[in-house]
Amino acid sequence: GFRKVVHIEQGGLVKPEKDDTEFQHPYFIRGQEHLLENIKRKVTSVSSIKNEDIKVRQDNVTKLLTDIQVMKGKQESMDSKLIAMK
């Protein structure tokens, strides 16, 4: 939940000359140690991925591989035509 602080003079586009990067969190407050227990690391679990998402991704990979094979065939055909023209 920590977020990078971008100062106005940096504009967010220019990298600072020295490494003085600053981060903030709403529960990270000086003198408020009791709030520290509210700071938790984000955890992504594999079980949160749905089976249908995996199926869609597999379908996308299969389509990409098919498209690549078609493009390879076209490239080889163009290469042979180019050689014949020379």
Image (spheres, rainbow, N blue to C red):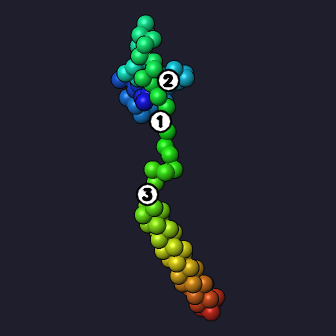
Give the quadrant of residue 9: top left
The amino acid sitting under disc 3 is Lys
Residue at horizontal 38 percent and vertical 29 percent from the top: 11
**Looking at the rendering, in which quadrant would you find the C terminus?**
bottom right
* Label 1 sits on residue: 42
> Residue at point 44% right, 66% down?
56
Earlier along the polypeptide chain: callout 1 or callout 2? 2
Q: Which circle's residue, 3 or 1, is located before the other in the chain?
A: 1
Camera-near label (1 vs 2) is 1
Residue position for label 2: 21
Which of disc 2 and disc 3 is earlier in sequence? 2
Give me the C-alpha separation between circle 3 and circle 2: 37 Å
Report the amino acid beneath label 2: Thr
* Disc marking residue 50: 3
Q: Mark 3 vs mark 1: give the one in front.
A: 3
Q: Secondary structure at mark 1?
A: loop
How far across and how far down the image is residue 58, in percent?
A: 50, 68
Residue at the image position 49 percent from the left and 23 percent from the top = 21
